[in-house]
Image (tube, rainbow, N blue to C red):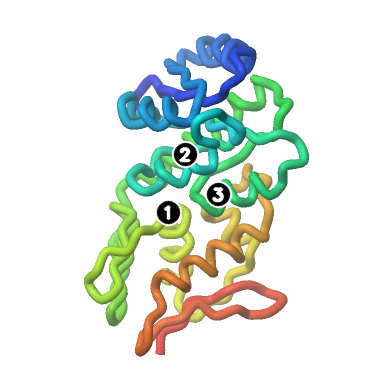
């Protein structure tokens, strides 16, 4: 992350941009503005921001589709902006790889606080890892240093949060971890998220790493959580 974080604001409402600019300027953050989905994708690749604020409802391409496209090639932190009551958008945004969400209407001061929290978590996750940053099992390789997963030597597309969850569980084989433990470990203690998103992430991870003859499994311990098992 650069010494002066650069924030990409993606929202079709000029008032949102104006309200955030003053607070970002006060924090000495640089920023750029996108007002539709196509422009958001373009600037995300051109500007290489340190964090993206991404509204769900935008013309050309909605924010969830933008998030889906960005996660194919980028691990840049994303905070979803969603209208009050749109719970499905918040949950889906997290499933697609967003790092946090903020419900409108919001206080610009709260947005800046959440930006700082996500950037702190991102910076911490990018610090040099210990020797267990690379985990290998029979036919499965998880590398948290470059956020890659290989199954039978073939690279599989994972979102950053999917890699972090898989690495967390695989680092403690046989240990049951609760949904709350996983949420706090991956998203941080200051994240007020929905525990149900863990279930959906686990389902997607299982689909990506399981094949006939695989010797590992993420099992459900009903009423408790999940554990990574190797046979």
Inspect this view and state whether residue 89 appears.
yes
Q: Do the residues labelled 1 and 3 touch (CB within 8 Å)?
A: no
Name which residue lies at 65% across and 21% down: 109
Judged from the image, the secondary structure of the residue bearing numbered disc 1 is: loop
The CA span between labels 2 and 1 is 14 Å
Within 10 Å of disc 2 (Cα), the crowding (few <14, some 14-19, many 20+) is: many
In the rendering, at what x and y percent does residue 15 appear?
Answer: 64, 13
Q: Residue furthest right?
A: 85
Q: Are marks 2 and 1 in contact (CB under 8 Å)?
A: no
Q: In this view, does 108 lie above or below 214?
A: above
Q: Which of 27 and 149 is in front in this view?
A: 149
Image quarter (top left, top right, bottom left or bottom right) of the N terminus: top left
| Residue 159, label in figure | 1
Name which residue lies at 62% across and 26% down: 111
Judged from the image, the secondary structure of the residue bearing numbered disc 2 is: helix
Q: Is residue 72 above or below residue 209?
A: above
Q: Are marks 2 and 3 in contact (CB under 8 Å)?
A: no
**Closer to the eye: label 1 or 3:** 1
Q: In this view, does 221 lie to the left or right of 52?
A: right
Q: In this view, does 170 lie above or below 165?
A: below
Judged from the image, the secondary structure of the residue bearing numbered disc 3 is: helix
| Residue 187, label in figure | 3
Image quarter (top left, top right, bottom left or bottom right) of the C terminus: bottom left
Name which residue lies at 59% across and 36% down: 56
Q: In this view, does 215 lie to the left or right of 199?
A: left
Inspect this view and state whether residue 1 appears.
no
In the rendering, at what x and y percent does residue 70 appear?
Answer: 40, 41
Q: Mark 2 points at which residue?
A: 66
């Amino acid at each position: 992350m650069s010494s002066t974080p650069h924030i990409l604001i993606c929202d079709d409402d000029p008032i949102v941009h104006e309200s955030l600019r003053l607070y970002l300027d006060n924090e000495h953050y640089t920023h750029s503005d996108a007002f539709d989905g196509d422009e958001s994708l373009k600037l995300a690749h051109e500007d290489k921001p340190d964090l993206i604020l991404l509204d769900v409802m935008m013309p050309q391409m909605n924010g969830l589709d933008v998030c889906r496209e960005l996660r194919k090639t980028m691990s840049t932190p994303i905070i979803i902006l969603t209208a009050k009551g749109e719970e499905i958008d918040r949950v889906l945004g997290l499933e697609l790889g967003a790092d946090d969400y903020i419900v409108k209407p919001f206080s610009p001061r709260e947005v800046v606080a959440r930006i700082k929290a996500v950037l702190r978590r991102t910076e911490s996750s990018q610090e040099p890892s210990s020797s267990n940053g690379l985990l290998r099992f029979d036919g499965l390789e998880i590398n948290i240093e470059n956020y890659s997963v290989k199954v039978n030597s073939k690279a599989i597309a994972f979102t950053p949060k999917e890699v972090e969850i898989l690495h967390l569980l695989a680092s403690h084989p046989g240990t049951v971890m609760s949904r709350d433990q996983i949420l706090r470990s991956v998203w941080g203690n200051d994240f007020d998220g929905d525990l149900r998103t863990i279930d959906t992430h686990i389902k997607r991870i299982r689909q990506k790493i399981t094949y006939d003859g695989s010797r590992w499994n993420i099992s459900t311990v009903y009423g408790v959580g999940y554990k990574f098992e190797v046979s």
